[in-house]
Image (tube, rainbow, N blue to C red):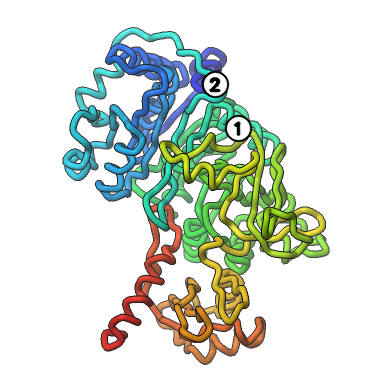
Amino acid sequence: MNLAVTLLTVARRLPNHLAVTEADSTLTYEELAARVLAIAGNLRGRGFAPGDRIVLCMENSTAFFEMLYGIWAAGLCAVPANAKLHPLEVRHIVENAGARMCVISSSLESGLRPAIPEGVQIVVAGAEDYRNLLSGPATAVVERAPEDPAWIFYTSGTTGQPKGAILSHRALLVMCHCYYADIDHLDERDTNLHAAPLSHASGLYALPHIARGGHQVILSGGFDPARVFVALEQYENVTLFCVPTMVSRLVSAAETRQLDSRNLKTLCFGGGPMYFRDLQKALSVFGPKLFQVFGQGESPMTITGLSKAQHADTTHPRYEALLASTGFPRTGVEVRVVGKENRDLPHGEIGEILTRSDCMMLGYWGNPEATASALREGWLHTGDLGSLDESGFLTLRDRSKDMIISGGSNIYPREIEEVLLQEPGVVEVSVVGRPHKEWGEEVVAFVVIKPGEDVTAEQLDAICLEHIARFKRPKDYRFVESLPKNNYGKVLKTELRKHLNEDATHPEECP
């Protein structure tokens, strides 16, 4: 089993069909396959052996797909890294993965080249060395076992150094099959629009599209709602993956620009909390075309999902609760919610979410301790907290590390964030715990207000007291211009906690 075969099969069946478009440059499947096999041959000629790792730190480009499938065709393992990472973070990934080569975009060369460890080959996309990889005769695809590593996915590292989740050829193929079973039927008439990093979810969801002959359209140069809207007018049967912050920006942009969404087939979103208010707005703009994905790098894009039909089912007796959930276990996926000693909890009770399927990591690269902690008795311990209802839909509450314990009571920040976002003047909010000598922790809310709006702590307190228990309401509101986020758009609550700890250490410096 080798994922590269999925591309080559399409190239034989649809040689002249468009495979990848970036700006004014387009490759057919036949052309893409030729480049992939040439890269594979050159990598083998340079002495790379099956299982060797190659890091791809690249901005979205056609070259990313050429390298990804070329690496697989050569029997190697790809290690995609977000192009927005700090050079020292990329260095950690290269060293941790034991990579022998790092392929980078030309725009990143000046920052990354000094950080790459000595002895690691550096190839710059578009430069002479890269062009050399594209020349020469094609080679046969190297056979791989289903459980051989294909992609090492480094977690975002919000609580320390990122860990490399090892994804096998089997796991990624199962991810593709789950896409077909739960999200959409795909064929050569489909367009997959890439506005999010290919190193992450958007690149993972390219795999089921490429395996069915879909057209990959790359919007390089960063996320821009206006360019997305133009692409929706230009291409048909469009699928787009977004993190929730991108969805919110599209919705905001649609308020000032006429949006023609007839060509939008599916808007997949995930990778962070989508609050109920924001989801309602998105449905009003895009209609019943949203599919929510809950997954992790350790179980890529495949734990639970809320389908387009379920988003549109306003007759559901618990419709609002359904929208606030992450849907139901995906096809072939098991989900449990457990408490102490891994015992299943009754419906509605909050505990850690466990999952089991063939779409799971083999473990963390070079980290047997973390692997043993995450994978136990065949189940992946996600570290996320949630609850299952009697019909099986899963509602996320928080990451276990984000839960606040005050006076012996568990407080879930997301519940408070949902309430505060009911204030129309609030753009974003993040709730964290602050150490308290008597109660253990107390609740603090960091709040971003719309420009020109005047929202007070008293107003927010009144909203909280109207909707949640008094002990859950924030004891302090911090009004800030923006929330710190990582390169995937997730709020860095660690940074917010650090800010609070610094205030406690130096109270005279508090704003």
The x and y percentages for residue 320 are 72, 66
84 up-or-down from 140: above or below? below
The x and y percentages for residue 50 are 41, 18
Tell me where residue 453 sits by quadrant.
bottom left
222 up-or-down from 422: above or below? above
Mark 1, residue position:
176
Residue at the extreme bottom of the image, as rendered: 458
Residue 6 marker: 2
Query: On the picture, is 383 further left or further right than 332?
Result: left
The x and y percentages for residue 432 are 48, 73
Of the pair 246 and 81, the residue shown nearer to us:
81
- How packed mark 1 is, by other alpha carbons closer than 10 Å (few <14, some 14-19, many 20 or more), is many
Query: On the picture, is 48 further left or further right than 256?
Result: left
261 up-or-down from 29: above or below? below
Q: Amino acid at mark 2?
A: Thr
Q: Is residue 261 visible?
A: no
Of the pair 315 and 434, the residue shown nearer to us:
434
Could you tell me which quadrant the N terminus lies in? top right
Q: How many marks?
A: 2
Could you tell me which quadrant the C terminus lies in? bottom left
Ranked by sequence position, the earlier of labels 1 and 2 is 2
Q: Residue at x 63, y 49 (%)?
A: 291
Of the pair 332 and 506, the residue shown nearer to us:
506
Tell me where residue 67 sits by quadrant.
top left
Q: Residue at x 81, y 60 (%)?
A: 316
CB of mark 1 within 8 Å of CB of mark 2? yes
Q: CA distance from mark 1 to mark 2?
A: 11 Å
Of the pair 461 and 6, the residue shown nearer to us:
461
Q: Secondary structure at mark 2?
A: helix
61 up-or-down from 480: above or below? above
